[in-house]
Image: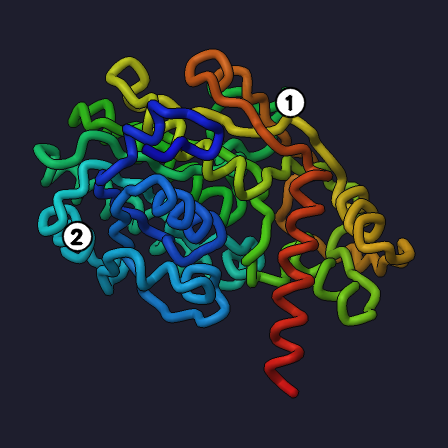
Amino acid sequence: MRLGRYGDKMASNFWAQRRVLLTGASGLVGSWLVKDLISKDAEPVCLVRDYVPDSLFFLEGLDKKVTIVRGSLSDVSDIGRAINEYETDTVIHLGAQAIVGAANRDPIGTFEANIQGTWNVLEAVRLRDDVVKRAIIASSDKAYGDQKKLPYEEDAPLMGRNPYDCSKSCADLISQCYASTYKLPIAISRCGNFFGGGDLNYSRIVPGTIKALYEGKKPTIRSDGKFVRDYIYVKDAVSAYETLSEKYSEKIRGEAFNFSNEQKMTVLEMVREICRIMGKPEQVEILNQAANEIREQHLSARKARQALGWKSQYTIQQGLAETVEWYAKFFDAKKKARR
């Protein structure tokens, strides 16, 4: 029997031959989660809409090692069919439109993906509650909106005001509604800004900065650089979703958990750290154009530590070092392929 990544024999037993339905499986967190679940002998069933060749999911051939259900979050029958036909007793809902700028440009599309997509997952779980034993719903620190008391704790009101934040507040509340009204086995995760190898959204600060520096360009910051954010390395995010699944019980039905390394940083500090790791001068272009964004957001993970025994395994610096290494190999491979 193989041990889990942290040597956890019990976790390895939990995932072995377990069928897990994942939405958003080809995204940043989804790809790393699928990869880790495969290593633990789980049997992922992945709802996939688009083929993105540079996604880690396709790049590393993970799609060849899982069951793929072609479908969309907009169609509850696609989700229900995946649960019913493959008898997935665990559902991890990661699928979302996750780019703030895109949400501002297309609020309706974001609401359809993030709110309707979530209630479709929940409704599919409700209709097949004889099959599903746990459903983990990805919310976000953005669901809290602008709060006077920081760090965010789970009892803070959800009051997102801009399109993306509002979509996460609504999806979070709807998840609580289904857990309370229908007694469904739902737990909710709230994480900060994910980063790690395989993020192809170069409008985000980490991959965008690494790409610019790799190409010999000056990285840009949309804001004034002083916005404070909670950054979580993708491998810590994977352990968060796995831990919440493993530790699920009726005692935490409908509850939300923050996951964080509790190491807040400004955007400018993040860029400077990447420059240091890559051995580049700290030359940054500050655009000061950010709109509809909260100035300071960071999380307390005390509840996850106490109730779930979860804790971060990576500092931001450790996560960034691995991330820079991943992109260096990725960009070098693409350069060689073009020759």
Q: Nearer the viewer, mark 2 or mark 1?
A: 2
Q: Quadrant of the C terminus?
A: bottom right
Relative to 271, residue 134 above or below: above
Q: Residue furthest front?
A: 1
Q: Image check: 15 left or right of 321? A: left
Instruction: Point out which mark residue 82 bears.
Output: 2
Query: Who's the residue at 66% across and 78% down the image?
Result: 335
Is residue 224 visible in the rendered image? The answer is no
Q: Quadrant of the N terminus?
A: top left
Q: Image check: 324 left or right of 278? A: left
Q: Residues within 10 Å of mark 2 (few under 14, many from 20)?
A: many
Query: Who's the residue at 22% across and 43% down the image?
Result: 19
| Amino acid type indicated by mark 1 | Leu
Q: Are marks 2 and 1 in contact (CB under 8 Å)?
A: no
Residue occupied by mark 1: 150
Q: Residue 66's x, y, as percent? A: 28, 56
Q: Hey, which quadrant is residue 333 in on the image?
A: bottom right
Q: Residue 197's x, y, as percent? A: 58, 54
Is residue 14 visible in the rendered image? The answer is yes
Query: Who's the residue at 27% across and 60% down the image?
Result: 72
Mark positioned earlier in the residue sequence (2 or 1)? 2
Q: Hey, which quadrant is residue 205 in on the image?
A: bottom right
Q: Residue 142's x, y, as percent? A: 53, 38
Q: Residues within 10 Å of mark 1 (few under 14, many from 20)?
A: few
Query: Who's the residue at 16% across and 27% down the image?
Result: 182
Q: Name the foreground residue: 43 vs 262.
A: 43
| Amino acid type indicated by mark 2 | Ala
Relative to 160, residue 157 above or below: above
Q: Hey, which quadrant is residue 324 in on the image?
A: bottom right
Q: Name the foreground residue: 255 vs 223.
A: 255
Q: Image check: 16 left or right of 334? A: left
